[in-house]
Image (cartoon, rainbow, N blue to C red):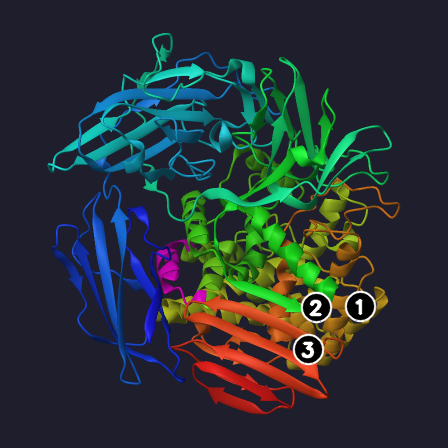
Amino acid sequence: MKLINLKTLSQYTPLGIDTTPYFSWMMESNEQDVLQTAYKLTVTHQDGELAWDTGKVESNCSAFINYTGSPLQSRSRYNWAVTIWDNKGNSASDESTFETAFMTNNDWNAKWAESTLPRSKSKAGFGNQPPATMFRKSFQLKEGIISARLYATCHGIYRLTVNGTRPDDREFAPEFTVYEKYLCYQTYDVTKQLQHGSNALGMYVGDGWYAGPQTVQNIKRFKPVHAVLFQLEVTYKDGSTEIICSDESVKTSYGPVMFSDLFAGEKYDANKEIPNWDKPDFDDTSWKPIAVKSYGYSNLVAQYGEPVQPVDILPAVKAYTSPKGESIIDFGQVMAGRVRINVNLPKGSEIILEHFETPDKDSNFFNNILNDAGLQGIGAGCDQKVIYVSNGQPVEYEPNFTFLGFRYIRVTSPADVRAEDFTAVVLSSKKENAGTFECSNPLINRLYENTRWSQQSNMLSIPTDCPQREKAGWTGDILIYATTALLNEDITTFLTRWLQNLACEQKSNGTVPVVVPYVKAYVKLAKLMALLKNDIGTVTSAGWGDAAVIVPYSMYQITGNTVILSNQYDSMKKWCDYIINTAKKRRGSRKIPKELDQYLWNTNFHFGEWLVPSLVKEGYSASGIKKAIESTMVYTAPIFGWYSVSTMADIAKILNKGDDEVYYSDIAAKMKHSIQNGVIDKDGNMPTELMGAYVLPIYFDLVPDKYKKQFADKLVKMIADNDGCLDTGFLGTPFLMDALCKIDRQDLAYSLLYQDKCPSWLFEVKQGATSIWESWYAFKEDGTPMPMSLNHYAFGCVDDWMFRYINGIDYLDAGFNKILIEPKPDESLHYAKRTFHSIYGEIVCNWERKDGKFLLDVTIPCNTTATIILPSGDSFDVGSGRYSYSC
């Protein structure tokens, strides 16, 4: 037996934490039925002082174990060691480290250094932004450097160099957060970059989310000016230390980035490059002094989780000339990132790259996301353009301060356009892969790959809706997709940080914005949408704000993470109390008796089911949106209100909060009763005859027994009447397949999975999709693209169902402590392979049909048990190990 994957705060050897850690590990053994029976944890400070010793704890717990030792000291390295014992008489030990950053704001000595360069107002659209700003500081160091840590952040986004080299390949630090309350700083080990004598630190700063016109936040006394804050702490061999800070000595200048914007793009003029600007021997006497500002440190938080980084490289697959004579490069895959180009042009020549997701029906350039819907400027200025101005020297160039959503680029250049000169750099927040999937149907495999690509594209700093038009943290998208996301990648730190920001944005009355961070553009959008219901100022919606409860609960279900439930508990309660109070105080418009109506959340603005295919077939329009909202919110709002409150009762039970469990269970029961007797009418009909209106009550067991057959028959008939296609939107689709299985129509669920007429998943695949579309109707019948994103992960939530039914891997206890393996494939599939890396280790389920038999191979990780059910009905209860079965 051995221990592997020791993690602190779900990270390997994190550098620079400022919160109380928790610990986890995994066991490996070549024996079967191995269970942990006890553990012992110790944490030791770098000076050898013991900070925590649990003693031997009789427990099978191996994850999310909270530190309860002595208070952690700032800027300190800690070693932690764990010994575990198993039920076979074995023991194993291993150790790891973590390092703290600033445990209190009093540890900051640095001063905010703000640019004094003239700055024009930033506006949407290419070329309407000021230049990026260079900051530098030179300093001297003694001989004998043994370690150095740099803590840095900015107003904007920055690239850091120390003596001309970057300490890592992170992008867009300090990333996208609720800046006024939660501004991240980053910790770097720069020991190897420093030298005895002269040194220089450089920070090149672009607008990013902080100062970009589409992402400006509601910050008091907001000033969209670039500023930096950094603190370098150096330790010498003789035990002495030295602190180098941002202060009055920092100098600033403009450079070759003429303007940059996360949406519009970037222009880079190589003729304005300043060689060696970030190196020690550079003469900065002509640079401008900065202004010291007192922005304080109260909002500073050590960055939790992995940074945005390059995660893949895709060479161009072809270059072609469009019917209009345009030079177009195809990378073969819709993605988020940017293009690296080899340039060899005469001095002053420009090469222009215009990024887009799909050509028009004739293979010409087409910007399918520009000014989408015209809703309060959402999508305005999304030019996705990059211009490089040559200085006459051959060079490899890649933009600095933008990322774009694209598969194709239109290239305008005085030179011949060759595919080999263009490479796509894929960007995402780096995450550990958690699963694989493959089956005998290549179209289903492509659907799975499309989901993974959309997840990668939209898990960049925050969970976004799309990587081109909005790049926004829509709460509804991640609510319906969180479970699938967790089954694909380890996104614990990623979602934790976002949920902390959700709590920052939550209002005093409990409401949660429809996007987090809640930027000004969406404040305007929310007001516009609320006007459709004469509800001025409403900023939330059922199925969106519910992310406050459902996302952390999804994390708990997939990983067993009770820490996130504890940390978000107050936020979850505030949201549920908002729902309960709103339902009680405001009467709905459907003349439901007060004793029922007071438990129905059926007032205010709601997005409803959103993007129901039959309601948006012709695209967006104000009248169409209003109709869709009014016809679907009548069932989505009451059901999702109940969903949050009933889930809150479960969470209170998990955390042993008995009074809250009783309270929310009671309210949830009354909500269910009101749905069954107020939303569902006396004849057993829903208020709107839409597919999702029947899917949701079936899935959530809200249908009274006397109407269950009626609901089932109606759902089946709706699918038949829709030519065998689905007709569910954002809030209905995640539950559609399971609802069919609940009424014993697994065959119909598989029929929907294999359907290739529009609207369907495989229609997109057969149309050549390489990612998940925002809308089922992304193209008109003649092939003309609609103004829709082709890179939204939301409808990729079907992967969750595929994993559970095709391969049969599911949890019986949270975090897969007890596992169910029950493949339920249809007859058309010949084999399927699935792996999932749970918090206990890798679960494997591979099966194939061969010579009239069903052959199953299963791997169960240590410290878990499993129930394995074959298609024949034979059942086996097993512990860890590898097993083979046939029937």
Q: Is residue 775 visible?
A: yes
Viewport quadrant of the N terminus:
bottom left
By secondary structure, the bulk of the magenta-drawn segment is best described as helix
Q: Is residue 730 visible?
A: no
**757 left or right of 552 in image:** right
Residue 387: horizontal and vertical position, in percent?
63, 23
The front one of 839 and 325 is: 325
**227 left or right of 738 in image:** left
Residue 234: horizontal and vertical position, in percent?
21, 34
Question: Pointers 2 and 1 in contact (CB under 8 A)?
Answer: yes
Q: In terms of sequence position, does the residue under pointer 3 or pointer 2 come before the other? A: 2
Disc 3 target residue: 825
Residue type for callout 1: Met
Disc 2 target residue: 694
- Judged from the image, the secondary structure of the residue bearing numbered disc 1 is helix
Q: Residue at x 45, y 29 (%)?
A: 156
The numbered disc on residue 718 is 1
Q: In terms of sequence position, does the residue under pointer 1 or pointer 3 come before the other? A: 1
- Judged from the image, the secondary structure of the residue bearing numbered disc 3 is loop
Report the span colored magenta. Answer: 559-571
Residue 745: horizontal and vertical position, in percent?
73, 78
Examine the structure image and report whether residue 277 is included in the region drawn in magenta. Answer: no
The front one of 156 and 283 is: 283
Q: Where is 10 relative to 342, above or below?
A: below
Residue type for callout 3: Pro
**Whole-Å distance between the Cαs marked 1 and 3?**
24 Å
Residue type for callout 2: Tyr
User: In terms of image quadrants, where is residue 68?
Assistant: bottom left
**Whole-Å distance between the Cαs marked 2 and 1?**
10 Å
User: In terms of image quadrants, where is residue 173?
Assistant: top left
User: In terms of image quadrants, where is residue 346?
Assistant: top right
**739 left or right of 241 in image:** right
